[in-house]
Amino acid sequence: MTKIFNDPSEFAEEALAGFCDVHSDLVRQVPGGAVRRYRPAQPKVAVLAGGGSGHYPAFAGLIGTGFADGAVVGNIFTSPSAQQAYSVAKAAESGTGVVFTYGNYAGDVMNFGMASERLAAEGIAVENVLVTDDIASAPPSESAKRRGIAGDFNVFKVMGAAAERGDTLAEVVRLGRKANSLTRTIGSAFAGCTFPGADAPLFTLPEGQMGLGLGIHGEPGLHDTDLPSARELGQELVARVLSETPANGGTRIAVILNGLGSTKHEELFVLWGTVAPLLRAAGYTLVMPEVGELVTSLDMAGVSLTVTWLDGELEPLWTAPAETPAYRRGNAPREAGTVTGEQASDGGAAAEAFVATDASRGYAAACIAAIQAAQASLHEAEERLGRMDAIAGDGDHGRGMVRGVDAAVSAAIAAFGEGAGSGDVLAAAGDAWADKAGGTSGVLWGAGLRAFGETVGNSAAPEGSALAAAVNAFTDRIVQLGKAELGDKTMVDALLPFAAAFSRDVAAGVAPVRAWETAAQESAAAAAATADLLPLKGRARPLAEKSLGTPDPGATSLAMVFAVMGPHLTGSAAGNEDLLAEAPAGAQ
Protein backbone atom coordinates (compact mmCIF):
# COMPACT_ATOMS: atom_id res chain seq x y z
CA MET A 1 0.00 0.00 0.00
CA THR A 2 1.19 3.53 -0.80
CA LYS A 3 1.79 5.06 2.64
CA ILE A 4 3.79 8.25 2.01
CA PHE A 5 1.63 11.10 0.75
CA ASN A 6 0.16 14.45 1.74
CA ASP A 7 -2.98 15.28 -0.23
CA PRO A 8 -3.65 12.17 -2.35
CA SER A 9 -4.95 14.32 -5.18
CA GLU A 10 -1.55 16.05 -5.38
CA PHE A 11 0.54 12.87 -5.18
CA ALA A 12 1.54 12.76 -8.86
CA GLU A 13 2.53 16.44 -8.97
CA GLU A 14 4.56 16.19 -5.77
CA ALA A 15 6.29 13.02 -6.94
CA LEU A 16 7.26 14.66 -10.24
CA ALA A 17 8.60 17.74 -8.45
CA GLY A 18 10.70 15.58 -6.12
CA PHE A 19 12.01 13.51 -9.02
CA CYS A 20 13.05 16.62 -10.97
CA ASP A 21 14.81 18.07 -7.94
CA VAL A 22 16.78 14.88 -7.26
CA HIS A 23 17.82 14.58 -10.91
CA SER A 24 18.21 18.26 -11.73
CA ASP A 25 21.51 17.50 -13.48
CA LEU A 26 19.60 15.56 -16.16
CA VAL A 27 16.01 16.80 -16.24
CA ARG A 28 13.96 19.94 -15.71
CA GLN A 29 10.30 20.21 -14.84
CA VAL A 30 8.06 22.08 -17.28
CA PRO A 31 4.29 22.52 -17.40
CA GLY A 32 2.88 19.08 -18.14
CA GLY A 33 5.94 16.98 -17.36
CA ALA A 34 9.72 17.15 -17.73
CA VAL A 35 12.37 17.53 -20.43
CA ARG A 36 16.13 17.10 -20.69
CA ARG A 37 18.10 19.63 -18.72
CA TYR A 38 20.10 20.76 -21.75
CA ARG A 39 19.10 21.58 -25.29
CA PRO A 40 20.82 19.46 -27.96
CA ALA A 41 23.95 20.97 -29.51
CA GLN A 42 22.43 20.25 -32.92
CA PRO A 43 18.71 20.09 -33.73
CA LYS A 44 17.33 16.58 -33.32
CA VAL A 45 13.99 14.83 -33.29
CA ALA A 46 12.39 15.09 -29.84
CA VAL A 47 11.11 11.72 -28.64
CA LEU A 48 8.40 12.35 -26.05
CA ALA A 49 7.13 9.42 -24.02
CA GLY A 50 3.94 9.87 -22.11
CA GLY A 51 1.06 8.56 -20.07
CA GLY A 52 -0.21 8.53 -16.53
CA SER A 53 1.87 8.48 -13.35
CA GLY A 54 2.38 5.37 -11.26
CA HIS A 55 4.68 3.53 -13.68
CA TYR A 56 8.15 4.68 -12.61
CA PRO A 57 10.71 4.52 -14.09
CA ALA A 58 8.33 5.01 -17.01
CA PHE A 59 7.96 7.67 -18.13
CA ALA A 60 10.00 10.54 -16.66
CA GLY A 61 12.75 8.23 -15.45
CA LEU A 62 13.63 7.48 -19.08
CA ILE A 63 14.53 11.06 -20.04
CA GLY A 64 18.13 11.38 -21.13
CA THR A 65 20.80 10.70 -23.72
CA GLY A 66 19.89 7.82 -26.00
CA PHE A 67 16.34 7.64 -24.70
CA ALA A 68 13.52 10.20 -24.35
CA ASP A 69 13.84 13.95 -24.75
CA GLY A 70 10.88 14.54 -22.47
CA ALA A 71 7.93 12.92 -20.76
CA VAL A 72 4.33 14.07 -20.60
CA VAL A 73 3.07 13.13 -17.16
CA GLY A 74 -0.59 12.70 -16.28
CA ASN A 75 -2.21 11.95 -12.97
CA ILE A 76 -2.02 8.40 -11.59
CA PHE A 77 -3.08 5.97 -14.35
CA THR A 78 -4.66 8.87 -16.25
CA SER A 79 -3.80 10.22 -19.67
CA PRO A 80 -2.16 13.63 -19.59
CA SER A 81 -4.20 16.39 -21.18
CA ALA A 82 -3.69 17.81 -24.65
CA GLN A 83 -2.45 21.01 -23.03
CA GLN A 84 0.19 19.11 -21.06
CA ALA A 85 1.37 17.29 -24.19
CA TYR A 86 1.53 20.54 -26.13
CA SER A 87 3.50 22.32 -23.39
CA VAL A 88 6.12 19.57 -23.09
CA ALA A 89 6.50 19.41 -26.87
CA LYS A 90 7.07 23.16 -27.07
CA ALA A 91 9.75 22.90 -24.39
CA ALA A 92 11.55 19.94 -26.00
CA GLU A 93 11.29 20.73 -29.72
CA SER A 94 14.60 21.87 -31.24
CA GLY A 95 13.77 22.32 -34.91
CA THR A 96 13.40 18.89 -36.53
CA GLY A 97 10.05 17.79 -35.17
CA VAL A 98 8.60 15.80 -32.29
CA VAL A 99 7.15 12.33 -31.94
CA PHE A 100 4.77 11.36 -29.14
CA THR A 101 5.00 7.70 -28.18
CA TYR A 102 2.66 6.01 -25.71
CA GLY A 103 0.53 2.97 -24.97
CA ASN A 104 -2.65 2.44 -26.96
CA TYR A 105 -5.31 3.83 -24.61
CA ALA A 106 -8.29 5.91 -25.71
CA GLY A 107 -7.52 8.92 -23.53
CA ASP A 108 -3.89 9.04 -24.65
CA VAL A 109 -4.86 8.71 -28.30
CA MET A 110 -7.34 11.59 -28.01
CA ASN A 111 -5.14 13.94 -26.01
CA PHE A 112 -1.89 13.38 -27.87
CA GLY A 113 -3.83 13.59 -31.12
CA MET A 114 -5.32 16.96 -30.18
CA ALA A 115 -1.91 18.26 -29.11
CA SER A 116 -0.47 17.06 -32.43
CA GLU A 117 -3.11 18.98 -34.36
CA ARG A 118 -2.25 22.14 -32.45
CA LEU A 119 1.50 21.71 -33.04
CA ALA A 120 1.00 20.98 -36.73
CA ALA A 121 -1.11 24.12 -37.09
CA GLU A 122 1.92 26.05 -35.84
CA GLY A 123 4.18 24.46 -38.44
CA ILE A 124 5.90 21.95 -36.14
CA ALA A 125 6.40 18.50 -37.67
CA VAL A 126 4.77 15.97 -35.35
CA GLU A 127 4.02 12.23 -35.39
CA ASN A 128 2.59 9.62 -33.01
CA VAL A 129 3.78 6.05 -32.38
CA LEU A 130 1.42 3.82 -30.39
CA VAL A 131 2.62 0.75 -28.51
CA THR A 132 0.39 -2.34 -28.78
CA ASP A 133 2.42 -5.16 -27.24
CA ASP A 134 -0.07 -6.78 -24.83
CA ILE A 135 -1.03 -10.08 -26.44
CA ALA A 136 -3.70 -10.75 -23.81
CA SER A 137 -5.79 -7.69 -24.61
CA ALA A 138 -6.92 -8.64 -28.14
CA PRO A 139 -6.43 -11.52 -30.59
CA PRO A 140 -3.80 -11.32 -33.35
CA SER A 141 -6.51 -10.46 -35.88
CA GLU A 142 -7.20 -7.28 -33.86
CA SER A 143 -3.64 -6.43 -32.89
CA ALA A 144 -4.22 -2.71 -33.50
CA LYS A 145 -6.65 -2.74 -30.54
CA ARG A 146 -4.08 -4.11 -28.13
CA ARG A 147 -2.93 -1.95 -25.24
CA GLY A 148 0.65 -1.00 -24.52
CA ILE A 149 2.31 -2.32 -21.36
CA ALA A 150 5.98 -3.08 -20.63
CA GLY A 151 6.82 -3.22 -24.33
CA ASP A 152 6.72 0.59 -24.10
CA PHE A 153 10.28 0.39 -22.79
CA ASN A 154 11.68 -1.48 -25.79
CA VAL A 155 9.94 0.71 -28.35
CA PHE A 156 10.96 3.93 -26.59
CA LYS A 157 14.58 2.72 -26.40
CA VAL A 158 14.74 2.06 -30.15
CA MET A 159 13.23 5.42 -31.00
CA GLY A 160 15.43 7.33 -28.56
CA ALA A 161 18.61 5.79 -29.92
CA ALA A 162 17.55 6.51 -33.51
CA ALA A 163 16.85 10.14 -32.69
CA GLU A 164 20.12 10.44 -30.76
CA ARG A 165 22.19 9.43 -33.78
CA GLY A 166 20.42 12.05 -35.89
CA ASP A 167 17.78 10.11 -37.81
CA THR A 168 14.98 12.06 -39.45
CA LEU A 169 11.50 12.21 -37.96
CA ALA A 170 10.16 9.84 -40.62
CA GLU A 171 12.94 7.35 -39.88
CA VAL A 172 12.48 7.49 -36.11
CA VAL A 173 8.77 6.86 -36.59
CA ARG A 174 9.37 3.99 -39.02
CA LEU A 175 11.80 2.27 -36.66
CA GLY A 176 9.48 2.77 -33.67
CA ARG A 177 6.56 1.22 -35.50
CA LYS A 178 8.77 -1.61 -36.68
CA ALA A 179 9.93 -2.30 -33.11
CA ASN A 180 6.33 -2.27 -31.92
CA SER A 181 5.29 -4.76 -34.62
CA LEU A 182 8.02 -7.13 -33.37
CA THR A 183 7.27 -6.78 -29.64
CA ARG A 184 5.07 -9.07 -27.54
CA THR A 185 4.25 -8.98 -23.81
CA ILE A 186 2.29 -11.14 -21.38
CA GLY A 187 1.88 -10.34 -17.69
CA SER A 188 0.53 -11.83 -14.50
CA ALA A 189 -0.68 -10.19 -11.28
CA PHE A 190 -0.49 -11.65 -7.78
CA ALA A 191 -2.12 -8.74 -5.92
CA GLY A 192 -3.70 -5.41 -6.81
CA CYS A 193 -2.24 -1.96 -6.29
CA THR A 194 -3.61 0.77 -4.02
CA PHE A 195 -4.03 4.47 -4.82
CA PRO A 196 -2.51 6.93 -2.34
CA GLY A 197 -5.15 7.60 0.28
CA ALA A 198 -7.26 4.58 -0.60
CA ASP A 199 -7.92 1.95 2.05
CA ALA A 200 -8.18 -1.01 -0.32
CA PRO A 201 -6.49 -2.19 -3.52
CA LEU A 202 -8.15 -1.82 -6.90
CA PHE A 203 -8.70 -5.56 -7.01
CA THR A 204 -8.04 -8.63 -4.91
CA LEU A 205 -7.39 -12.24 -5.76
CA PRO A 206 -8.46 -15.35 -3.89
CA GLU A 207 -5.77 -16.99 -1.83
CA GLY A 208 -3.49 -19.13 -3.99
CA GLN A 209 -4.52 -17.56 -7.32
CA MET A 210 -3.05 -15.12 -9.83
CA GLY A 211 -4.53 -13.05 -12.66
CA LEU A 212 -3.08 -13.75 -16.09
CA GLY A 213 -3.06 -10.91 -18.62
CA LEU A 214 -2.75 -7.87 -16.34
CA GLY A 215 -2.79 -4.21 -17.32
CA ILE A 216 -0.38 -1.57 -16.01
CA HIS A 217 -3.16 0.76 -14.82
CA GLY A 218 -4.10 -1.46 -11.94
CA GLU A 219 -6.41 -3.63 -14.03
CA PRO A 220 -6.78 -7.23 -12.85
CA GLY A 221 -5.80 -10.14 -15.04
CA LEU A 222 -8.08 -11.22 -17.84
CA HIS A 223 -8.68 -14.52 -16.10
CA ASP A 224 -7.71 -16.01 -12.75
CA THR A 225 -5.82 -19.25 -12.38
CA ASP A 226 -4.09 -21.20 -9.64
CA LEU A 227 -0.80 -19.67 -8.56
CA PRO A 228 1.91 -21.88 -10.06
CA SER A 229 5.49 -22.51 -9.05
CA ALA A 230 8.15 -20.23 -10.53
CA ARG A 231 9.02 -22.94 -13.05
CA GLU A 232 5.42 -23.36 -14.14
CA LEU A 233 4.91 -19.61 -14.37
CA GLY A 234 8.01 -19.20 -16.51
CA GLN A 235 6.85 -21.96 -18.82
CA GLU A 236 3.43 -20.31 -19.14
CA LEU A 237 4.82 -16.87 -19.93
CA VAL A 238 7.36 -18.11 -22.47
CA ALA A 239 4.86 -20.36 -24.21
CA ARG A 240 2.33 -17.56 -24.59
CA VAL A 241 4.84 -15.05 -25.94
CA LEU A 242 6.45 -17.49 -28.37
CA SER A 243 3.03 -18.58 -29.61
CA GLU A 244 2.87 -15.16 -31.24
CA THR A 245 6.31 -15.18 -32.83
CA PRO A 246 6.16 -12.76 -35.77
CA ALA A 247 6.54 -14.25 -39.23
CA ASN A 248 9.65 -12.17 -39.88
CA GLY A 249 11.17 -12.68 -36.42
CA GLY A 250 14.85 -13.60 -36.31
CA THR A 251 16.82 -15.59 -33.76
CA ARG A 252 18.15 -12.66 -31.75
CA ILE A 253 15.81 -11.11 -29.19
CA ALA A 254 15.66 -8.31 -26.64
CA VAL A 255 14.03 -9.59 -23.45
CA ILE A 256 12.81 -7.83 -20.32
CA LEU A 257 11.44 -9.57 -17.25
CA ASN A 258 9.63 -6.73 -15.55
CA GLY A 259 8.46 -6.33 -11.97
CA LEU A 260 5.21 -4.42 -11.50
CA GLY A 261 6.02 -2.64 -8.24
CA SER A 262 6.34 -4.93 -5.24
CA THR A 263 7.73 -8.12 -6.72
CA LYS A 264 11.28 -8.44 -5.40
CA HIS A 265 14.28 -8.62 -7.69
CA GLU A 266 15.21 -11.93 -6.08
CA GLU A 267 11.84 -13.35 -7.17
CA LEU A 268 12.46 -12.13 -10.70
CA PHE A 269 15.89 -13.76 -10.73
CA VAL A 270 14.33 -17.07 -9.69
CA LEU A 271 11.83 -16.75 -12.53
CA TRP A 272 14.60 -15.81 -14.96
CA GLY A 273 16.18 -19.16 -14.12
CA THR A 274 13.32 -20.77 -16.04
CA VAL A 275 12.64 -18.09 -18.68
CA ALA A 276 16.17 -17.74 -20.06
CA PRO A 277 16.88 -21.47 -20.61
CA LEU A 278 13.52 -21.93 -22.30
CA LEU A 279 14.17 -19.07 -24.71
CA ARG A 280 17.66 -20.35 -25.48
CA ALA A 281 16.31 -23.87 -25.98
CA ALA A 282 13.90 -22.42 -28.54
CA GLY A 283 16.92 -21.30 -30.57
CA TYR A 284 17.19 -17.67 -29.49
CA THR A 285 20.18 -15.54 -28.57
CA LEU A 286 19.31 -13.13 -25.76
CA VAL A 287 20.76 -9.69 -26.48
CA MET A 288 21.43 -7.55 -23.41
CA PRO A 289 18.39 -8.74 -21.45
CA GLU A 290 16.95 -6.71 -18.58
CA VAL A 291 15.50 -7.98 -15.30
CA GLY A 292 14.02 -5.45 -12.89
CA GLU A 293 11.40 -2.74 -12.53
CA LEU A 294 11.05 -0.88 -15.83
CA VAL A 295 7.30 -0.25 -16.25
CA THR A 296 5.45 -0.57 -12.96
CA SER A 297 1.91 -0.19 -11.62
CA LEU A 298 2.29 1.57 -8.24
CA ASP A 299 2.66 -1.22 -5.67
CA MET A 300 1.16 -4.06 -7.72
CA ALA A 301 2.63 -7.50 -7.14
CA GLY A 302 3.16 -8.96 -10.59
CA VAL A 303 5.50 -9.68 -13.44
CA SER A 304 5.54 -9.38 -17.20
CA LEU A 305 7.69 -10.89 -19.93
CA THR A 306 8.47 -8.85 -23.05
CA VAL A 307 10.27 -10.03 -26.18
CA THR A 308 11.30 -7.88 -29.13
CA TRP A 309 12.59 -9.76 -32.16
CA LEU A 310 15.70 -7.95 -33.43
CA ASP A 311 17.28 -7.55 -36.84
CA GLY A 312 20.20 -5.63 -38.29
CA GLU A 313 18.35 -2.33 -37.91
CA LEU A 314 16.90 -2.73 -34.44
CA GLU A 315 19.73 -4.46 -32.57
CA PRO A 316 22.20 -1.54 -32.72
CA LEU A 317 19.46 0.73 -31.38
CA TRP A 318 18.58 -1.66 -28.56
CA THR A 319 22.24 -1.96 -27.51
CA ALA A 320 23.13 1.74 -27.98
CA PRO A 321 24.34 3.68 -24.92
CA ALA A 322 21.85 5.56 -22.79
CA GLU A 323 21.92 7.60 -19.61
CA THR A 324 18.76 8.57 -17.79
CA PRO A 325 17.88 9.01 -14.11
CA ALA A 326 16.59 5.44 -13.90
CA TYR A 327 18.45 3.57 -16.62
CA ARG A 328 22.03 3.43 -17.86
CA ARG A 329 23.58 1.33 -20.59
CA GLY A 330 27.13 1.59 -21.90
CA ASN A 331 29.07 4.83 -21.88
CA ALA A 332 26.66 7.49 -23.07
CA PRO A 333 28.18 10.98 -23.26
CA ARG A 334 27.03 13.26 -20.45
CA GLU A 335 24.98 16.12 -21.85
CA ALA A 336 26.10 19.70 -21.40
CA GLY A 337 25.41 23.00 -23.04
CA THR A 338 22.59 25.50 -22.98
CA VAL A 339 19.97 24.97 -20.30
CA THR A 340 16.48 24.90 -21.76
CA GLY A 341 14.49 28.06 -21.13
CA GLU A 342 13.09 28.37 -17.65
CA GLN A 343 9.58 29.04 -18.93
CA ALA A 344 7.97 26.83 -21.55
CA SER A 345 5.35 28.61 -23.58
CA ASP A 346 1.90 27.14 -23.23
CA GLY A 347 0.89 28.78 -26.47
CA GLY A 348 -1.97 30.58 -24.83
CA ALA A 349 -3.20 33.68 -26.55
CA ALA A 350 -3.32 36.93 -24.64
CA ALA A 351 -6.50 37.25 -22.62
CA GLU A 352 -9.23 38.96 -24.56
CA ALA A 353 -11.85 41.26 -23.10
CA PHE A 354 -15.13 39.42 -22.65
CA VAL A 355 -18.26 40.82 -24.25
CA ALA A 356 -21.64 39.65 -22.95
CA THR A 357 -25.17 40.90 -22.49
CA ASP A 358 -26.83 41.16 -19.08
CA ALA A 359 -29.06 38.23 -20.00
CA SER A 360 -26.06 36.08 -20.83
CA ARG A 361 -24.34 37.12 -17.61
CA GLY A 362 -27.41 36.06 -15.68
CA TYR A 363 -27.37 32.67 -17.38
CA ALA A 364 -23.62 32.40 -16.76
CA ALA A 365 -24.35 32.57 -13.03
CA ALA A 366 -26.82 29.71 -13.48
CA CYS A 367 -24.18 27.72 -15.37
CA ILE A 368 -21.71 28.15 -12.53
CA ALA A 369 -24.33 27.01 -10.04
CA ALA A 370 -24.94 23.96 -12.25
CA ILE A 371 -21.26 23.04 -12.29
CA GLN A 372 -21.06 23.56 -8.52
CA ALA A 373 -24.00 21.19 -8.08
CA ALA A 374 -22.14 18.65 -10.20
CA GLN A 375 -19.06 19.24 -8.04
CA ALA A 376 -20.91 18.41 -4.83
CA SER A 377 -22.47 15.31 -6.36
CA LEU A 378 -19.19 14.00 -7.76
CA HIS A 379 -17.28 14.54 -4.52
CA GLU A 380 -19.93 12.54 -2.69
CA ALA A 381 -19.74 9.74 -5.28
CA GLU A 382 -15.96 9.71 -5.85
CA GLU A 383 -15.20 6.51 -3.96
CA ARG A 384 -18.21 4.65 -5.39
CA LEU A 385 -17.31 5.61 -8.96
CA GLY A 386 -13.74 4.50 -8.36
CA ARG A 387 -14.88 1.10 -7.10
CA MET A 388 -17.11 0.65 -10.14
CA ASP A 389 -14.24 1.57 -12.45
CA ALA A 390 -11.87 -0.86 -10.73
CA ILE A 391 -14.04 -3.85 -11.63
CA ALA A 392 -12.73 -3.86 -15.20
CA GLY A 393 -10.67 -0.69 -15.48
CA ASP A 394 -8.06 1.27 -13.59
CA GLY A 395 -10.19 2.68 -10.77
CA ASP A 396 -9.44 6.33 -11.52
CA HIS A 397 -12.82 7.51 -12.80
CA GLY A 398 -14.04 9.04 -9.55
CA ARG A 399 -10.79 10.84 -8.89
CA GLY A 400 -10.56 12.07 -12.47
CA MET A 401 -14.10 13.44 -12.44
CA VAL A 402 -13.47 15.24 -9.16
CA ARG A 403 -10.24 16.80 -10.44
CA GLY A 404 -12.01 17.87 -13.61
CA VAL A 405 -15.07 19.42 -12.00
CA ASP A 406 -12.99 21.22 -9.36
CA ALA A 407 -10.89 22.83 -12.08
CA ALA A 408 -14.02 23.65 -14.07
CA VAL A 409 -15.62 25.48 -11.14
CA SER A 410 -12.50 27.56 -10.49
CA ALA A 411 -12.08 28.46 -14.17
CA ALA A 412 -15.77 29.32 -14.60
CA ILE A 413 -15.78 31.65 -11.59
CA ALA A 414 -12.56 33.31 -12.76
CA ALA A 415 -13.96 33.91 -16.25
CA PHE A 416 -17.21 35.22 -14.80
CA GLY A 417 -15.31 37.64 -12.60
CA GLU A 418 -13.63 39.04 -15.72
CA GLY A 419 -16.96 39.72 -17.39
CA ALA A 420 -17.60 36.53 -19.34
CA GLY A 421 -21.04 35.53 -20.50
CA SER A 422 -22.47 32.03 -20.37
CA GLY A 423 -20.76 30.77 -23.52
CA ASP A 424 -17.30 31.86 -22.44
CA VAL A 425 -17.85 30.65 -18.87
CA LEU A 426 -18.73 27.16 -20.10
CA ALA A 427 -15.84 27.15 -22.57
CA ALA A 428 -13.40 28.10 -19.81
CA ALA A 429 -14.85 25.41 -17.57
CA GLY A 430 -14.50 22.82 -20.33
CA ASP A 431 -10.90 23.70 -21.11
CA ALA A 432 -9.94 23.52 -17.43
CA TRP A 433 -11.77 20.20 -16.98
CA ALA A 434 -9.89 18.64 -19.89
CA ASP A 435 -6.53 19.98 -18.73
CA LYS A 436 -6.72 18.95 -15.09
CA ALA A 437 -8.67 15.70 -15.36
CA GLY A 438 -6.80 14.22 -18.33
CA GLY A 439 -7.82 10.76 -19.47
CA THR A 440 -10.69 9.85 -21.74
CA SER A 441 -13.47 11.26 -19.58
CA GLY A 442 -11.53 14.48 -19.08
CA VAL A 443 -11.09 15.26 -22.75
CA LEU A 444 -14.70 14.26 -23.52
CA TRP A 445 -16.27 16.33 -20.75
CA GLY A 446 -14.03 19.26 -21.59
CA ALA A 447 -14.83 19.18 -25.28
CA GLY A 448 -18.53 18.69 -24.56
CA LEU A 449 -18.77 21.68 -22.22
CA ARG A 450 -16.93 23.87 -24.71
CA ALA A 451 -19.33 22.81 -27.49
CA PHE A 452 -22.30 23.52 -25.20
CA GLY A 453 -20.92 26.98 -24.46
CA GLU A 454 -20.15 27.80 -28.07
CA THR A 455 -23.74 26.96 -28.98
CA VAL A 456 -25.25 28.97 -26.12
CA GLY A 457 -23.08 32.00 -26.91
CA ASN A 458 -22.88 35.23 -24.95
CA SER A 459 -25.96 37.08 -26.14
CA ALA A 460 -28.97 35.55 -24.44
CA ALA A 461 -30.22 32.97 -21.98
CA PRO A 462 -31.27 29.96 -24.06
CA GLU A 463 -34.92 29.07 -24.38
CA GLY A 464 -36.10 25.50 -24.98
CA SER A 465 -35.00 25.01 -28.59
CA ALA A 466 -31.67 26.78 -28.04
CA LEU A 467 -31.00 24.67 -24.95
CA ALA A 468 -31.81 21.51 -26.91
CA ALA A 469 -29.35 22.65 -29.60
CA ALA A 470 -26.66 23.09 -26.94
CA VAL A 471 -27.33 19.61 -25.51
CA ASN A 472 -27.07 18.17 -29.01
CA ALA A 473 -23.80 20.03 -29.62
CA PHE A 474 -22.43 18.57 -26.37
CA THR A 475 -23.53 15.11 -27.49
CA ASP A 476 -22.24 15.38 -31.06
CA ARG A 477 -18.80 16.53 -29.93
CA ILE A 478 -18.42 13.64 -27.50
CA VAL A 479 -19.58 11.05 -30.03
CA GLN A 480 -17.28 12.52 -32.66
CA LEU A 481 -14.25 12.39 -30.37
CA GLY A 482 -14.91 9.10 -28.61
CA LYS A 483 -16.26 7.16 -31.62
CA ALA A 484 -18.55 5.23 -29.27
CA GLU A 485 -22.04 4.03 -30.13
CA LEU A 486 -25.05 2.86 -28.15
CA GLY A 487 -24.29 -0.51 -26.63
CA ASP A 488 -20.52 0.00 -26.33
CA LYS A 489 -20.88 0.45 -22.54
CA THR A 490 -19.59 4.00 -22.30
CA MET A 491 -20.97 7.36 -21.21
CA VAL A 492 -22.66 7.56 -24.61
CA ASP A 493 -25.17 4.94 -23.45
CA ALA A 494 -26.55 7.50 -20.96
CA LEU A 495 -25.90 10.58 -23.08
CA LEU A 496 -27.73 9.67 -26.28
CA PRO A 497 -31.00 8.75 -24.51
CA PHE A 498 -30.86 12.03 -22.60
CA ALA A 499 -30.32 14.13 -25.73
CA ALA A 500 -33.03 12.30 -27.65
CA ALA A 501 -35.59 12.60 -24.85
CA PHE A 502 -34.90 16.26 -24.18
CA SER A 503 -35.09 17.26 -27.85
CA ARG A 504 -38.26 15.21 -28.31
CA ASP A 505 -40.12 16.77 -25.41
CA VAL A 506 -38.98 20.33 -26.10
CA ALA A 507 -40.10 19.99 -29.71
CA ALA A 508 -43.48 18.79 -28.39
CA GLY A 509 -43.88 21.96 -26.35
CA VAL A 510 -42.97 20.57 -22.93
CA ALA A 511 -41.43 23.14 -20.59
CA PRO A 512 -37.60 22.79 -20.49
CA VAL A 513 -37.54 22.03 -16.76
CA ARG A 514 -40.00 19.13 -17.19
CA ALA A 515 -38.31 17.93 -20.35
CA TRP A 516 -34.96 17.88 -18.53
CA GLU A 517 -36.40 15.93 -15.61
CA THR A 518 -37.82 13.28 -17.94
CA ALA A 519 -34.59 13.09 -19.93
CA ALA A 520 -32.57 12.73 -16.73
CA GLN A 521 -34.77 9.84 -15.60
CA GLU A 522 -34.31 8.08 -18.94
CA SER A 523 -30.57 8.71 -18.78
CA ALA A 524 -30.32 7.23 -15.28
CA ALA A 525 -32.26 4.15 -16.37
CA ALA A 526 -30.01 3.75 -19.41
CA ALA A 527 -26.91 4.08 -17.23
CA ALA A 528 -28.19 1.39 -14.86
CA ALA A 529 -28.93 -0.86 -17.85
CA THR A 530 -25.28 -0.81 -18.90
CA ALA A 531 -24.73 -3.43 -16.20
CA ASP A 532 -26.04 -5.93 -18.73
CA LEU A 533 -23.61 -4.85 -21.45
CA LEU A 534 -20.11 -5.96 -22.35
CA PRO A 535 -17.70 -3.05 -22.99
CA LEU A 536 -16.56 -2.60 -26.57
CA LYS A 537 -14.47 0.54 -26.02
CA GLY A 538 -11.87 1.81 -23.58
CA ARG A 539 -9.75 0.11 -20.91
CA ALA A 540 -12.60 -2.10 -19.74
CA ARG A 541 -12.84 -3.87 -23.11
CA PRO A 542 -10.14 -6.51 -22.39
CA LEU A 543 -11.90 -7.33 -19.10
CA ALA A 544 -15.37 -7.42 -20.59
CA GLU A 545 -16.60 -10.48 -18.70
CA LYS A 546 -15.55 -9.05 -15.33
CA SER A 547 -17.61 -5.92 -15.94
CA LEU A 548 -20.84 -7.80 -16.55
CA GLY A 549 -23.26 -6.93 -13.77
CA THR A 550 -21.65 -3.56 -13.01
CA PRO A 551 -22.94 -0.35 -14.64
CA ASP A 552 -20.46 1.70 -16.65
CA PRO A 553 -18.95 4.37 -14.36
CA GLY A 554 -18.83 6.95 -17.17
CA ALA A 555 -22.51 6.51 -17.96
CA THR A 556 -23.34 6.56 -14.25
CA SER A 557 -21.49 9.79 -13.57
CA LEU A 558 -22.97 11.48 -16.64
CA ALA A 559 -26.52 10.66 -15.61
CA MET A 560 -25.77 11.84 -12.07
CA VAL A 561 -24.27 15.14 -13.24
CA PHE A 562 -27.03 15.91 -15.73
CA ALA A 563 -29.68 15.28 -13.07
CA VAL A 564 -28.29 17.86 -10.65
CA MET A 565 -27.40 20.44 -13.30
CA GLY A 566 -30.91 20.49 -14.76
CA PRO A 567 -32.66 22.88 -12.35
CA HIS A 568 -29.95 25.48 -12.92
CA LEU A 569 -29.59 25.15 -16.69
CA THR A 570 -33.35 25.25 -17.23
CA GLY A 571 -33.81 28.31 -15.02
CA SER A 572 -35.92 26.64 -12.35
CA ALA A 573 -33.40 27.04 -9.51
CA ALA A 574 -33.21 30.18 -7.40
CA GLY A 575 -30.21 31.87 -5.87
CA ASN A 576 -27.99 32.36 -8.91
CA GLU A 577 -28.19 36.11 -8.43
CA ASP A 578 -25.57 35.87 -5.68
CA LEU A 579 -22.77 35.49 -8.19
CA LEU A 580 -23.92 38.55 -10.10
CA ALA A 581 -23.97 40.55 -6.89
CA GLU A 582 -20.42 39.43 -6.05
CA ALA A 583 -19.00 40.20 -9.51
CA PRO A 584 -16.42 43.03 -9.67
CA ALA A 585 -17.67 46.45 -10.58
CA GLY A 586 -17.85 46.82 -14.34
CA ALA A 587 -17.94 43.04 -14.88
CA GLN A 588 -21.72 43.07 -15.15
Image (cartoon, grey):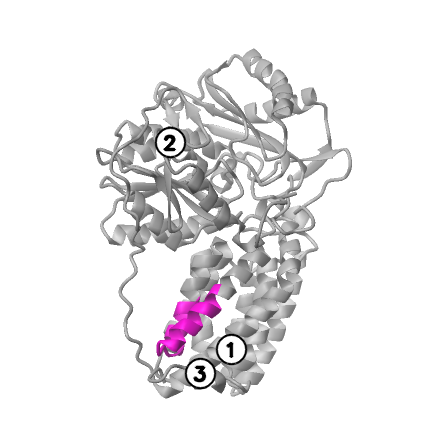
Q: Which residues are magenta?
A: 407-429
Q: Earlier in the sequence, mark 2 or mark 1?
A: 2
Residue 355: image location, x then y, percent: 30, 79
Which is more foreground, mark 1 or mark 3?
3
Kind of element beneath mark 2: loop
Rendered location of residue 545, percent (x, y):
67, 47
Q: Give me the residue at 60% from left, 78% from top.
A: 518
Numbered tag placed on residue 88 in the rendering = none
- Which image quadrant for residue 220? top right
Please give the name of the residue rendered at 55% of the width and 36% of the height, measured from the top-left corner: 296
The C terminus, quarter of image: bottom left
Q: Amino acid at mark 3?
A: Glu
Most distant residue in the right direction: 207
Per the model, the C-alpha gap separating discs 2 and 3 is 52 Å
Residue 389 on image: x %, y %: 62, 53
* Secondary structure mostly seen in the magenta stretch: helix
| Residue labelled with disc 2 | 67
Can residue 451 be seen here? no
Q: Which residue is mark 3?
A: 582
Q: Which mark is residue 369?
A: 1
> Mark 2 belongs to which amino acid?
Phe
Query: What residue lies at 60% left-to-right and 19% top-to-bottom?
Result: 272
